Image: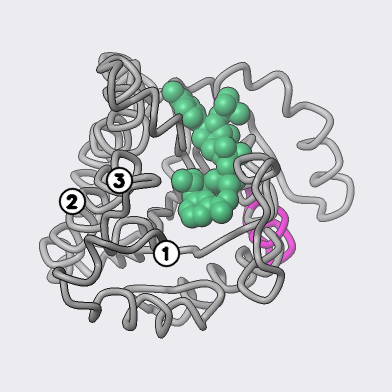
Amino acid sequence: MSYVLIIGAKSDIAKAVAREYAKHGYDLYLGARDVSELEAFAQDVMTRTQKEVKLVELDILDYASHQTFYDSLEEKPLGVISAVGYLGEQEKAQSDFSQTQKIIDSNYTGVVSLFNIIADDFEQRRSGFMVGISSVAGDRGRKSNYIYGSAKAALTAYLSGLRNRLYDAQVQVLTVKPGFVATKMTENMDLPEKLTAQPQDVAADIYKAQQSGKSVLYTKWIWRWVMLIIRSIPEFQFKKMSI
Ligand SMILES: NC(=O)c1ccc[n+]([C@@H]2O[C@H](COP(=O)([O-])OP(=O)(O)OC[C@H]3O[C@@H](n4cnc5c(N)ncnc54)[C@H](OP(=O)(O)O)[C@@H]3O)[C@@H](O)[C@H]2O)c1
């Protein structure tokens, strides 16, 4: 058994994670919508690493397809990494529930639907690892992105419970909380350089944390302390702030 399943595989972080795992000897399943767009990328990874890369079509919002999706993987993966996410538009979401629902379902419900299926399999096999990319945005709700933040908070709580459930079965569950990362998702934002990670640095952090059996990873590491400070601001002050 040699495959790692990466979902949301067109994301810049997922691509960097794919390169990192292939470099370390793993074969890959890359799951994404319109997965044919990943053909050149997959070919490049295979040429550089001599590892297998298989493309699998996946829409995280098509819950009914998730069992069939997982059943169709001939060789079951030894781990799964989710980079699925959708930032959406906070202001639009405030008055348009369909936008709110898309944010919640893309970041939370869809990942839960597929992770439930994979967790059952890993629990039965008593092995495996599950990595969910959540966000520091889930650590405290802010007016600028609290719909997205609340979906990530739910994902963080889900992963915490899953880790607790799967501990006895020796299945590792890693929650990844990136701060700012320079990707397509943030390309229109003016991000502070010192607090912004590159996708390949996040990927290296994820690989190292997963291999060493960690439970929660902040990346860049400094975000653990930034969020500690942000979480400790009293609510009577926090509600007046724009951060
Ligand atoms: N960039 C940051 O600063 C940052 C910070 C904290 C956390 N994160 C999290 O890191 C992860 C990767 O984000 P990123 O920055 O690399 O941004 P991204 O490129 O927007 O990645 C999100 C990925 O999720 C996929 N996705 C969305 N809806 C989907 C669906 N219905 N079915 C299947 N795939 C779907 C997208 O696929 P398509 O390409 O098909 O749209 C995209 O590849 C996300 O979970 C994000 O929330 C990012």
Task: Name the one closer to the observer, 26 or 12.
Answer: 12
Tag 3 near tag 1, CB within 8 Å = no
Say which of marks 2 and 3 sits in front.
3
Say which of marks 3 and 1 sits in front.
3
Q: Which residue is mark 2?
A: 124
119 up-or-down from 20: above or below: above
Q: Amino acid at mark 2?
A: Gln
Residue 126 falls left or right of residue 208 = left
Q: Which residue is mark 1?
A: 177
| Residue 236 position in % (x across, y down) | 14, 70
Question: What is the tally of numbered marks visible in this picture?
Answer: 3
Whole-Å distance between the Cαs marked 2 and 3? Answer: 36 Å
| Residue 75 position in % (x across, y down) | 47, 38
Residue at position x 22%, y 72% in the image: 237
User: Residue 146's mark?
Assistant: 3
Q: Confirm whether the magenta stretch covers residue 162.
A: no
